[in-house]
C-alpha cells in the first residue's frame, strides 16, 4: 500500500515538471544515463544537467515532505 502511494506521489511530481526537466530526470534516474550522455542527447552543457538534477532532487524532496512520505 505504501509503495503505491509513493509511486503515485512520484508520478504526480514528474507530471508537474517542465518537459526538459522531466526528460533529464528520467534519463538519469530511470535509464541510468550519465550526465555526459544526457548532455549529448539534449544539447545542454554537463554543468546545466548537473544543476537541473540538483534542483529537481530538491523539488522532489520538498514534494515528498509535503505529502509526508519522506
Image (cartoon, helix red, strand yellow):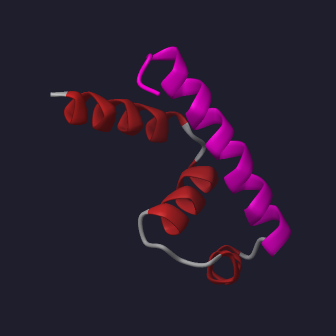
Residue 31 x/y as whole percent: 43, 72
Residue 15 x/y as whole percent: 45, 38
In the picture as drawn, the residue positioned furthest to the front comes out as 70
State whether the magenta stretch is mostly helix, strand or loop.
helix
The image quadrant where one finds the N terminus is top left
Q: Is residue 31 left or right of residue 61?
A: left
- The answer to if 17 sits in the magenta stretch is no
- The answer to if 52 sits in the magenta stretch is yes
Q: Nearer the viewer, residue 56 or 2?
A: 2
Q: Quadrant of residue 49?
A: bottom right
Q: Nearer the viewer, residue 58 or 17?
A: 58
Q: Residue at x 49, y 62 (%)?
A: 29
Q: Is residue 1 above or below residue 26?
A: above
Q: Residue at x 72, y 50 (%)?
A: 54
Q: Residue at x 54, y 51 (%)?
A: 22
Q: Is residue 4 left or right of residue 37?
A: left
Residue 63 x/y as whole percent: 54, 25
Q: Is residue 15 above or below residue 39?
A: above
Residue 39 x/y as whole percent: 71, 77
**Tally of numbered discs:** 0
The residues colored magenta run 46-70
Amino acid at each position: 500500500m505504501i509503495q503505491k502511494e509513493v509511486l503515485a506521489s512520484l508520478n504526480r511530481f514528474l507530471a508537474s515538471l517542465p518537459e526538459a526537466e522531466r526528460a533529464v530526470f528520467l534519463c538519469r534516474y530511470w535509464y541510468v544515463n550519465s550526465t555526459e550522455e544526457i548532455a549529448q542527447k539534449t544539447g545542454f552543457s554537463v554543468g546545466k544537467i548537473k544543476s537541473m538534477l540538483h534542483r529537481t532532487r530538491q523539488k522532489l524532496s520538498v514534494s515528498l515532505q509535503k505529502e509526508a512520505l519522506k
